[in-house]
Image (cartoon, rainbow, N blue to C red):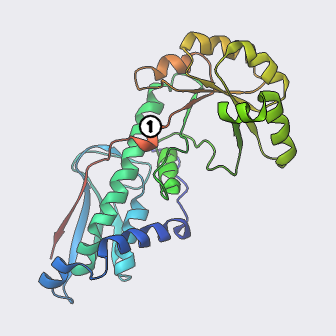
Amino acid sequence: MGERPIPLYPIVYQPIIEGALREDLGRAGDLTTDAIVSPDLRATGTIGARRGGRVAGLEVALSAFRHLDPTVEVAIEVPDGADAEAGEILARVQGGARELLSAERTALNVLGRMCGIATTTRDLARSIAHTEARVVCTRKTTPLLRCLEKYAVRIGGGSNHRYGLDDAVLIKDNHRALAGGAAAAVERARRHIGHLVKIEVEVDDLDELEALIALGIDAVLLDNMSPEMLRQAVVRVDGRAITEASGGITPTTAPAIAESGVDLLSVGWLTHSAPVLDVGFDMEL
């Protein structure tokens, strides 16, 4: 598994879990469970992987049970960052039967989503492990779940691109069109930002690459270029800026793109289209 991943602070994900539970319980609570299960009944539940994959978000998911039953006891069997086999038990919980049942779906929804992203990232990162390139995610995340999804990318062995609009400058075609060109956009951005903020510019034409590098930018986003064009771009940049490939990156094309020599592969579908990992919850008295 390697070095244990740095966990998310509970203060970051607690509002998400609270909101998800509130959405599910609605105005009247869990009608089915409240009608059938005695309020003083205690039970044990196990969370298991029904398909193999990378575990991510287990503490986040387990917090759903703690929100409804602060006395719940938890034992983690396979921690975040480890790979689980199909059928393997990830965690065991013991607490109020009503609370465990009512929190089950929220916990599984979060865990399945995060494990799916981590597993997809892991597989893509492995496919380019023979190169120096890294896989990075984008802002194409589920609204309000960005912190969870970007964490899952890190657990899968990827890295995060900018976290939001406020931590880096990324000048794209529309910015350049409205500013009157790339040079004007870079100049305006540099006057506006602080000295620690980096500037990246999207490029889809090799002919303009040299002029952009001369502006002293930190990174270039090489958009929808073939591996051969990317290879030429890397030669022209010659280490003067970070090179990031974007567009057309699939599990099939990723190795060739990484072999072009770019520093980063920017992949939006890691977070917007990764398949959910199938996880389940089984209870007994």
Query: Percent x, y for residue 44?
Result: 22, 73
The front one of 51 and 146 is 146
Query: Percent x, y for residue 276?
Result: 32, 47
Quadrant location of the N terminus in the rendered image: top left
Image quadrant of residue 236? top right
Residue picked out by circle 1: 269
Label 1 SS: helix
Q: Quick one: which residue is furthest to the bottom in this view? A: 40
The front one of 199 and 177 is 177
Crowd band around label 1 with a 10 angstrom C-alpha radius: few (<14), some (14–19), many (20+): some
In the figure, 38 relative to 90: above or below?
Answer: below
Image quadrant of residue 177? top right
Query: Percent x, y for residue 145?
Result: 47, 57
In the figure, 211 relative to 281: above or below?
Answer: above
Image quadrant of residue 67? bottom left
Picture residue at 45% right of the left edge, 39% below the top: 270
